[in-house]
Image: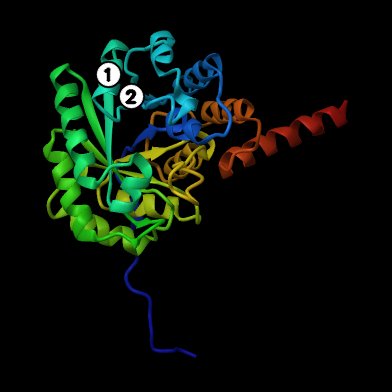
Amino acid sequence: MDSGTHPGPPLNLGARLPPRVDVYEVGPRDGLQNELRSVPLKDKLRLVTALVASGERRIEVTSFVSPKWVPQLADADELLARVERPPGVTFSALVPNLKGLERAKTARLEEAAVFASATETHSQKNINKSIAEALHVAGAVTKGALATGMRVRGYLSVVWGCPYEGTTSLDTVVDLARRLLDFGIYQLSLGDTIGVGIPTQTESILEALLRHIPASKLALHLHDTRGTALANALVGMTYGVTTLDASVGGLGGCPYAPGAAGNLATEDLVNLLHGMGVQTGIDLSRLVEAGEVAQELIGRKLSGKYLQAALGERDRLIARKRQAH
């Protein structure tokens, strides 16, 4: 029986997608910083090399945070001294303060990342600073980095929701985003730090921000804690966002955001993009190889669904060939 309700017009989703998306790889930093054990430098270099071999061109490799707070990344200086720097590949690092900036300069860092939280409680728990103090530091680091010729990117955390304060104020998000961009950063990455976002909320956030900020200045950094990261990424693309952060195999999260385990897996994102005809410049099969390297280095299965499906299919094929002989 006809209920009298009918679906609206088709979305024509393909026509609303960009022809190309830049994938910003955060696994070597955001992924490894959240692991209980430290990965040796030679293995980090092996992972970065595998990511470059897959065609990734924007890779956040480390952080110049105090080793006391994040011992997993204590080798930032040596990593940047030893990593090969192929033409066309940009390596970036998180730079939390002016002391870190001095280390970054010595390491010949090309791109720095600064950050702030959108709630006071997360800011205090994450970096022991108020939002105002964090903005002051971010502004000083940005000014110093730009003066030395570095590009600077920004992160705004807990945009969709906070583990301590619940849903984040949209007015606060817009205000902080505008202030961070006013410092001179070239792009602001919006973080769903605990993976609570849903597509309708993502629409609301982007509609509010795009009244003041062009989509080209925004990126999305989505965690897949509740399985909604790809859906939110898809919404972002229909609003003109063409840079998406992702982590090889789904590594990582924020150690100061309870329940934040698991970034959007790079393989899952690239598989979706390629399937919809969106170009990335990344070889998915080589990316799976990089995911296998990451999995080997940390000694456990990673959460990336495409990675596990591809490795499982390969193992089954190997088993069939053995049986045939």
Q: 91 or 306, which is in the foreground?
A: 91
Can residue 48 be seen at all in this image of the molecule? yes
Give the residue drawn at x 36%, y 57%: 161
* Position above or below: 218 against 53: below
SS for callout 1: loop
Q: 172 or 89, which is in the foreground?
A: 172
Which quarter of the figure is the C terminus placed in? Answer: top right
* Position above or below: 164 against 245: below
Mark 1 sits on what residue? 110
**Residue 323 placement (x, y as % from top left):** 87, 31
**Residue 317 placement (x, y as % from top left):** 74, 33
Mark 2 sits on what residue? 92
* Position above or below: 178 against 49: below
**Residue 37 placement (x, y as % from top left):** 58, 29
Pointer 2: residues within 10 angstroms few (<14), some, or many (20+)?
A: many
Q: CA–CA distance between discs 2 and 1?
A: 6 Å
Q: How is the image coloured?
A: rainbow
> Residue 82 sits in which quadrant?
top left
Give the residue drawn at x 37%, y 40%: 278
Pointer 1: residues within 10 angstroms few (<14), some, or many (20+)?
A: some
Can residue 15 be seen at all in this image of the molecule? no
Left or right relative to 293: residue 212: left
Total marks placed: 2
